[in-house]
Image (spheres, rainbow, N blue to C red):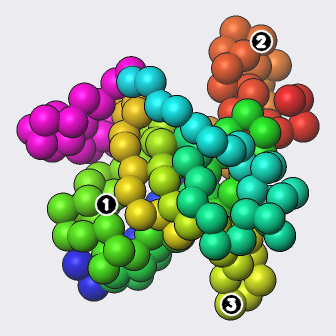
Amino acid sequence: MGETFMKDQEHLPETAEDLNELMRVRREKMAAIAAKDIEPFGRKYHVTYHANDILNQFEELDGQTARLAGRIMAVRGHGKASFAHLMDMSGRVQLYFRQDVLGDDLYENFRLLDIGDIIGIEGVVFRTQKGEISVKVTSFEILAKSLRPLPAKWHGLKDVETRYRQRYLDLIVNPEVR
């Protein structure tokens, strides 16, 4: 488990075969999640704050427990600690996952997550050594597993027809249209 993983560097599949392979891997992860008696789709989750609340009210929330839910937009990590960006309807906040805090089983579940998955987290609000406001995750639930990859974030979604037909996708990957 000491390998570095950079899920935020996933590229869009170039061919239909690449897309099928990526979706096959994501289905395998979904099956692994279901094998642990975790429902991979659809669940209600009570939140206490949104991402922008954490960022705007940091002084009052520093050290406090918060519950958030949203879509994973990036994951980076090494070994027993990882960072992820969670995006909800209000904005984006950084999450900090540590194996010693979550425990081996829950951290293994974290490793099954992909960009685009929707999770609910509970954790403590803090500021990292580099000064970024974050939430140290103490527990999380998988609310919905994403089987299809999101478009590459640095290219965005440019095709106008696709943007109109798949409006939900346009809202996810192009923050300027929100």
| Label disc, if present, on residue 129 of the rendered structure | 3
Q: Amino acid at mark 3?
A: Gln
- Secondary structure beneath label 1: helix
- Secondary structure beneath label 2: helix
Q: Which part of the image, by quadrant, shows the N terminus?
A: bottom left
Q: Position of residue 168 (x, y in %)?
A: 67, 20
Up/down of 86 relative to 168, above or below? below
Q: Based on the picture, tell me whether residue 51 belongs to the magenta stretch.
A: no
Question: Which one is earlier in the sequence, the residue at label 3 or at label 1?
Answer: 1
Tell me what residue is drawn at x 56 percent, y 66 percent.
124
Visible residue check, residue 21: no
Q: Residues within 10 Å of mark 2 (few under 14, many from 20)?
A: few
Look at the numbered discs 1 and 2 and tell me whether their residues touch, using CB distance below 8 Å.
no
Q: Amino acid at mark 1?
A: Arg
Q: Position of residue 166 (x, y in %)?
A: 66, 15
Q: CA distance from mark 3 to mark 2?
A: 42 Å
Question: Which one is earlier in the sequence, the residue at label 1 or at label 2?
Answer: 1
The nearer-to-camera label among 1 and 2 is 1
Q: Position of residue 175 (x, y in %)?
A: 82, 39
Residue ID for mark 2: 164
The nearer-to-camera label among 3 and 1 is 3
Q: Quadrant of residue 15?
A: top left
Q: CA distance from mark 1 to mark 2?
A: 33 Å
Q: Which part of the image, by quadrant, shows the C terminus?
A: top right
The stretch in magenta equals 21-42
| Label disc, if present, on residue 111 of the rendered structure | 1
Visible residue check, residue 23: yes
Query: Is most of the magenta stretch helix, strand or loop?
Result: helix
Question: Which one is earlier in the sequence, the residue at label 3 or at label 2?
Answer: 3
